[in-house]
Image (cartoon, grey):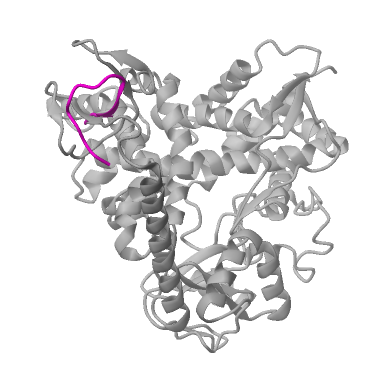
Amino acid sequence: MSVSIESKAHERLAYCTPSWSQTDTRSIGVPTRVGDGRVIQVVACGRVASCANSVATNSLQKRIYIAAPGTVSRLFILSMLLYVVLFVAALCALYSFRGSRRHGLEHIPTVGYESGLLYYLSAIRYLFNARDIIEEGYRLYPGHAFKVPMLDGWNVVLNGSNHVEDLKKVTDDNLCAFASTREFFQFDLTLGPRVSDNRYHFSVIRTVMTRNIGPRFTDIHEAVVNAFEDQLAGIGSDWAKIQAFPFHVDIISKVTSRFFVGYPLCDNAEFRSICEAATGEIFKGRALRAFPTLLRPFASRLVTGIHSLRARMEILLRPIIEERLDQEKRHGVDWDQKPNDLLTWLIDGARATGEEVSVEDISSRMLFVSFGAIHTSSMTFTSALYQLCMSPSDVKILRDEAEAAVREEGWTKEALAKMVKMDSYIRESSRVHPMSLISVGRTAMSDFTFSDGLFVPKGTKICVNTHGRHFDEGLYPDPYAFDGFRFLNKDDPDSQPPAVLPTVDYHAFGYGRPACPGRFFAIVELKLMMAHLLINYDFKLQTGAYPSKLCFETIVVPSRTESILYRKRQN
């Protein structure tokens, strides 16, 4: 494409700026008359490192004028695009072909094809039909392992309980959980290597954040009440139809923001929008694994918008973080009125590990924590509520339990602890409607042999067959029937496993020490939301069937388009 800085009528303007602002985004696509009378159109906005053949109009902006349509043959452009697509596809095919030949896993049976183009076709099939492949592997190799072809290499799927127990015992030096997640989502290219190399935010979530659930419980409950009142304002005795999943994302985003950053930032719609978008953009990092390693840094700028989100997050957090650091300099680390929130915990966590406190780093970690907090809880809550809508008798049981607990204990952690039937219900919903067909992912950091003799060489990616085990008749009688009170110990409720507890047969939160560190906050949040909804509102599905799910590769997402009818509780 030719580049010109000559004056032309109706030129299209590519607009580059080193920062993101609301003013910039409003002007995209809008014809604008500049000072010399020309009409230009902003067609892009973002953080651009450099603009070739550009003219600086001021200290902040650079502009490139692209020649008018027709200057370059459209056929030529399409031909070049086709060549690029074919080149990338060829590299990806070669990449997959090489991965299919050099794996050292010949002793492990395969579900799918093993070599050449057939391997690549099997990997594509896995993207769209993973459930059938996972089920087939569990049926053909009970108690053992099998491997499946993926676009970037093999994944060994473990079926046996002994495998799960072995994973709990080993250290990260042998089989590393985060190395698996790091590679799966390509964190180094999205959030940056510092977030992966020094994972102090895990310790912050597991310890400091969990300890503060009690002291901050009133804030969490108040946020739940306010969020529902904001979203259901005007709801009366007539049924109102609301699209369920976006509604739940908004509720959880408001509650999570209140706990993470408090006032006034939690009320900032831009902040919540960034946190909500983080999950989708980080998930896009998964697509980078389809590219050869050399192309991934370039592809990351095209595939995911996480870099733009981080820039926007930095704008919001910079004045807050700088103010807190200034207070520390003037009054000491434990200055009066020091906020008790995630920003403070992350700053303290960085210092405790010798990490330099920077706005960019804290912003990346805020995006990471939001990635793990908002959409996962939204999917869990949506799945449970869809299920609850199908059983009015279960609604009455859970409602009676919630009312009795609140009547005795008020809105406290003690009240939630007494909602054991709700615990069982959430646990069963997560069993039947998991967010992933597999879990407990690990990467072999060295050659490793399981207790049954299964050998995996260094670099092997492994996981547990969650779907197969959650629907195994030997582990769960009548596994395809939803029983909300399956986990309820009627004789001794205190001995039943709480929803947050991973076991050898239940992997919704992972298993072992690397299990989800934020699960304790997530369950408190979910139970508060469920109890508030049960006590104050009636709800039902428009149809009697459970809404269809979306499954891509091993990720399972509840319907994002289904609506639920709500009204104020009538009796």
Q: Quadrant of the C terminus?
A: top right
From the viewer's perspective, is residue 238 above or below residue 513? above
From the viewer's perspective, is residue 392 above or below residue 196? above
Q: Say whether residue 87 is left or right of residue 234.
A: left
Q: Position of residue 16 (x, y in %)?
A: 24, 30
Secondary structure that dominates the magenta span: loop
Q: Is residue 222 magenta?
A: no
Q: Quadrant of the rendered structure where residue 123 is?
A: bottom right
Q: Quadrant of the rendered structure where residue 158 is?
A: bottom right
Q: Position of residue 429 (x, y in %)?
A: 71, 48
Q: Say whether residue 59 is left or right of residue 113.
A: left
Q: Position of residue 366 (x, y in %)?
A: 37, 39
Q: Nearer the viewer, residue 240 or 287?
A: 287
Q: Position of residue 390 (x, y in %)?
A: 83, 39
Q: Quadrant of the N terminus?
A: top left
Chain part drawn in magenta? 1-18
Name the residue: 82% across, 64% down. Answer: 477
**Residue 537 appearing in the image:** yes
Q: Is residue 14 magenta?
A: yes
From the viewer's perspective, is residue 35 above or below residue 504? above
**Residue 190 appearing in the image:** no
